[in-house]
Image (cartoon, rainbow, N blue to C red):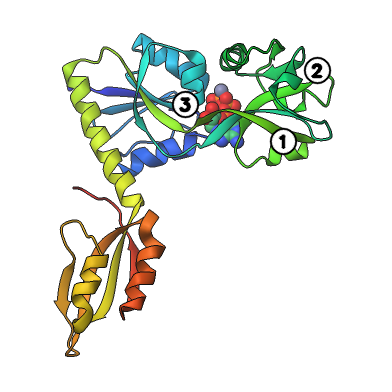
Amino acid sequence: MEKKLKIAIQKSGRLNEDSIKILKEAGIEFQNGLNKLKAEAVNFPLEVFFLRDDDIPQYVEDGVADIGIVGENVFIEKNKQVKIVDRLGFGKCRLSIAIPKNQKYKGLSDLEGKRIATSYSTVLSKYLKKNKISAEIHEISGSVEIAPGIGLADAICDLVSSGSTLFTNGLKEVEVILKSEAVLIANNNLSKEQQAILEKLLFRISSVKKAKSNKYILLNAPNKNLDAICKILPGMKSPTILPLADKGWSSVHSVVNENDFWDIIEKLKNKGAEGILVVPIEKMIL
Ligand code: ATP
Ligand code: ZN
């Protein structure tokens, strides 16, 4: 039988959809895990396990799964013998300390002797220790944000993205402990075959990520400014130039990075570029 790689992803919750999406964009087809524990990919040697995110680091350490997708915050909190092999760019959030809105806050020392509710007690206690603050940590597994309101704690340490949950619960963010995104973790003792499948998967994921951060750009340029325009456009090797039926004009094609995008458009317009089209790229193989 052909060897397969087993990947654990979140069964339901914030990382579920994007985890499935990144695998599908990598061209891997499988059935989504509604009411199922696992699914087999039809066109790639991969088996997908749908689990609670908290359990994934342990399963990967034990080799029940070979790799997994979890928030970096979970990876750090669980502190298992697994390694991060890629950062996936979704599930971005921060682990922060928040206190009731109307309370004054001058600095960490205000937390001295206070009760802090959290699901991330390991990370929090390390942070407090490092900053020489002694506070009481109340470990709770969910709905941490309501703890101050019901008198269970004076502060919370929880994940924040937009901050709207804090806001609706009358809290304000006062310290950021760590920043997190989804990461791909792997068992430390993969076999050669498993490692080879992982490399293939990583290659595909990197093509998808590159494609997302780049755009294909087409424009019409007056020939007299072609040199200047080509200098502005990096391209994978160099821009493609095709003559237009209209004498004195050319069509220029290239790839630009999202980060420099508006900057480049501005410069192109200044050099007389017209009819600029920007198209998403599906995969980018370098
Ligand atoms: P499970 O049932 O699998 O244990 P959960 O309730 O622990 O799920 P979710 O709330 O679905 O977990 O969050 C999963 C991960 O999504 C978090 O560990 C974190 O990395 C990421 N995340 C991104 N933004 C946020 C946010 N605003 N709040 C909480 N988690 C976030
Ligand atoms: Zn969880």
User: Residue 94: horizontal and vertical position, in percent?
Assistant: 57, 32
State yes or no: discs 2 and 1 in contact (Cβ < 8 Å): no
Ligand 2 found in image quarter: top right
Residue 148 percent coordinates (x, y): 80, 24
Amino acid carrying mark 3 in the image: Glu
Residue behind mark 1: 166
Q: Classify mark 3: residues with Cα within 10 Å, few (<14), some (14-19) or many (20+).
A: many
Q: Secondary structure at mark 1?
A: helix
Residue picked out by circle 3:
72
First in sequence: mark 3 vs mark 1:
3
Q: Residue furthest bottom?
A: 247
The quadrant holding residue 269 is bottom left
Q: Seen in the image, is 137 located left or right of residue 60?
A: right
Disc 2 target residue: 152
Question: Could you tell me how far apart the alpha carbons at marks 2 and 1 are, in whole angstroms?
Answer: 16 Å
Task: For label 2, count other residues whose C-alpha is less than 10 Å away and answer few (under 14), some (14-19) or many (20+).
Answer: some
Q: Earlier in the sequence, mark 2 or mark 3?
A: 3
Question: Which comes before the other along the chain, label 2 or label 1?
Answer: 2
**Residue 247, quarter of picture:** bottom left
Residue 261 percent coordinates (x, y): 37, 61
Q: Residues within 10 Å of mark 1 (few under 14, many from 20)?
A: many
Residue at the (35%, 51%) spot, across then down? 213
Answer with the quarter of the image where residue 149 lies.
top right
Q: CA distance from mark 3 to mark 1?
A: 21 Å
Asked if the residues shown at circle 3 and circle 1 are in contact, with their CB atoms under 8 angstroms apart, the answer is no
